[in-house]
Image: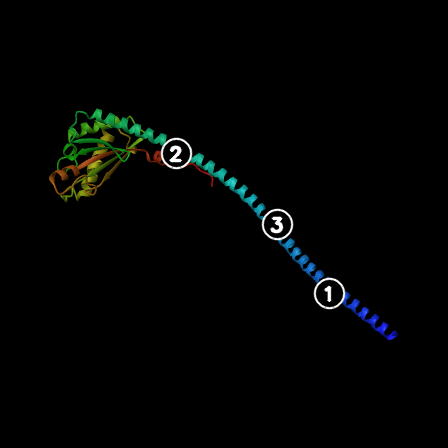
Amino acid sequence: MKNQKIFLLLLGVIFMTSCKNQKVVQMEKQIMTKQEQIDQLKQQVNNLQSTNGSLLDRMSDLAIINKTGAESIHKSLESLGQQYGFIQDLSQKIQHKDSLNLALVMNLKRSLQDVNDEDVHVEVRGGIVHVSISDKMLFKSGSSNLSSRAKEVLGKIADVVSDHEELEIMVEGHTDSVPMNNSCIRDNWDLSVKRATSVVRVLEEEHYVDPSRITAAGRSSHVPKSDNDTAEGRSANRRTEIIITPRLDQFFKLLEAPIVAN
């Protein structure tokens, strides 16, 4: 009987110990699970902190970029303002030049109104005043000696251009394509240059046009107005052109752009 009680007591102890061990195991599992959750949360916190730091750095970079961008926009607006002012100024100067050209053409045509339009043609071409004079009015065939009628016409042109000292005068000699060669003239280049020089001498010596304003140039047959295959075409190509332009230094000054911000 006594032994039976002791056995039953041992069985109770073993059962209680077994139950206690199971609870301990369960608690240990729960603790491990919680620890894993804690570790995961710590990792998430670290990730969030890293992300937050990166965002703060980017915000700082954006602030710098925005400041730089604002300065760049400000400089660009200043540049646009300067360029707009330059364009307005240039437009006014071009309008002034066009008005001057128109007045010059009107004065030349008025001065030359008694001259046949076929012999003298005044026009604005490429923004420049051109006075084209046929060779039959100025010279005899193959010669660079000016006629008395030619000197009269050149005098009328000189009277007009003398009122505009700010303008330069280029005299261009042109020939047809028929080769030229005699004891006085070597070729068409020679003829075109000598004819231009003859006109320049009359403007300077007889009508007192400032020689520093005048240029003599020969173009030979290389800038034709018409076809050299016909007599009419060759006649149109034999001419002297007086080209009236702004002084080059004034022209380049007109085209100078203002210094703008980068």
Residues at badges 2 and 1 in contact (C-beta under 8 Å)? no
Circle 2 sits in a helix, a strand or a loop, which is it? helix
Q: Which residue lies furthest to the front in this view?
A: 1
> Dot 3 corresponds to which residue?
52
Q: Name the residue furthest right.
A: 2
Residue at 54% in and 44% down: 65
Q: Residues within 10 Å of mark 2 (few under 14, many from 20)?
A: some
Quadrant location of residue 204?
A: top left
Identify residue type, mark 1.
Val
> Which comes sooner in the sequence, label 1 or label 3?
1
Q: Mark 1 points at which residue?
A: 25
What is the x, y in percent for residue 175?
Answer: 17, 40
Question: Which badge, 2 or 1, comes first in the chain's sequence?
Answer: 1
Q: Nearer the viewer, residue 214 or 58?
A: 58
Q: In this view, does 7 lie above or below 165?
A: below
Distance in Å between CA atoms under marks 2 and 1: 90 Å
Q: In this figure, which residue is indicated by the disc labeled 2?
A: 87
Distance from the alpha carbon under mark 1 to that under mark 3: 40 Å
Q: In 3D space, how far apart are the residues under numbered discs 2 and 3 (Cα atoms)?
A: 51 Å
Asked if labels 3 and 1 touch by Cβ distance under 8 angstroms, the answer is no
Circle 1: element type: helix
Point out residue 5 in the picture as x, y percentages from the top left corner.
86, 72
Residue 148 to residue 142: above or below: above
Residue at (81% x, 71% y) in the render: 11
Give the residue drawn at x 39%, y 34%: 87
Q: Which amino acid does label 3 sit on?
A: Asn
State the mark number for residue 71: none
Q: Specify whether 38 is left or right of 194.
A: right
Dot 3 alpha-carbon crowd within 10 angstroms: few under 14, some 14 to 19, many 20 or more: few
- Do the residues under discs 2 and 3 have CB atoms within 8 angstroms? no
